[in-house]
């Protein structure tokens, strides 16, 4: 292989990496839901074990995280935000899919969600917290509601 051919390969690879990096930076600026602004993110949790009874989650990142609520009938959610880390506890009355909503002042900066502990419908801790998946959905734009004086 000639030196000129090797140099062309590295130039092409460098150009491809630069293009990918620029695309990734642009995607980060607009976030998953488009431009920044306040709103509510719904986090749906898919369990590898089936219906769950309760779970503890840790959220890091995100901007201006506020109240956290359940989206299921028959359950409670507890939360605490401190030093850039949020703990969210979801307890269901009946085993099922875990969901919660978190209010944020910047919908363009999603938090990272991690499972800390999970209990099944019989209140037995799961043997592992591996394999859980999260889906994020923007469910409400709070910016106009705040301007109108809604709670």
Image: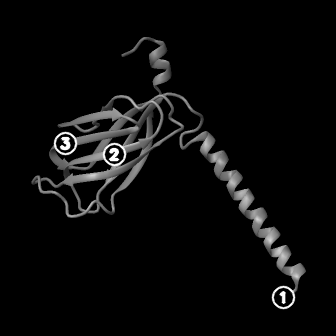
Image colouring:
one colour
Pointer 1: what residue? 1
| Structural crowding at the residue carrying mark 3, measured as other residues with C-alpha within 10 Å and reported as few (<14), some (14–19) or many (≥20) | many
Label whose residue precedes the other's in the sequence (3 or 1): 1
| Structural crowding at the residue carrying mark 2, measured as other residues with C-alpha within 10 Å and reported as few (<14), some (14–19) or many (≥20) | some
| Structural crowding at the residue carrying mark 1, measured as other residues with C-alpha within 10 Å and reported as few (<14), some (14–19) or many (≥20) | few
Pointer 2: what residue? 58
Label whose residue precedes the other's in the sequence (1 or 2): 1
Q: In this view, does 148 lie above or below 4?
A: above
Pointer 3: what residue? 91
Q: Quadrant of the N terminus?
A: bottom right
Label whose residue precedes the other's in the sequence (3 or 2): 2
Say whether residue 44 is left or right of residue 7: left
Q: How far across and down, in percent of the image, does residue 132 sit?
A: 33, 58
Q: How far across and down, in percent of the image, does residue 79 sit?
A: 28, 35
Nearest to viewer (mark 3 / mark 1): 1
Residue in the image at 45% along x and 24% along y: 142
Q: Residue furthest bottom?
A: 1
Marks 3/2: CA distance? 15 Å
Secondary element type, mark 1: loop
Mark carried by residue 63: none
Marks 3/1: CA distance? 63 Å
Residue in the image at 28% along x and 59% along y: 129
Secondary element type, mark 3: strand
- Is 19 in front, or is 33? 19
Residue in the image at 36% along x and 16% along y: 151
Q: How far across and down, in percent of the image, does residue 93 sit?
A: 14, 42
Q: Which residue lies furthest to the right in this view?
A: 4
- Is 81 in front, or is 133? 81
């Amino acid at each position: 292989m000639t030196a000129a051919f090797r140099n062309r390969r590295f130039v092409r690879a460098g150009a491809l990496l630069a293009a990918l990096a620029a695309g990734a930076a642009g995607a980060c600026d607009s976030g998953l839901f488009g431009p920044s602004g306040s709103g509510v993110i719904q986090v749906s949790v898919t369990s590898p074990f089936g219906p769950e009874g309760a779970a503890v989650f840790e959220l890091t990142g995100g901007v201006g995280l506020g109240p956290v609520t359940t989206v299921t009938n028959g359950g409670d959610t507890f939360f605490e935000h401190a030093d850039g880390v949020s703990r969210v506890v979801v307890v269901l009355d009946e085993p099922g899919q875990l969901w919660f909503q978190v209010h944020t002042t910047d919908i363009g900066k999603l938090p990272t969600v991690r499972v800390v502990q999970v209990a099944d419908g019989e209140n037995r801790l799961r043997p592992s917290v591996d394999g859980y998946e999260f889906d994020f959905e923007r469910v409400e734009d709070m910016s106009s509601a705040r301007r109108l004086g809604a709670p």
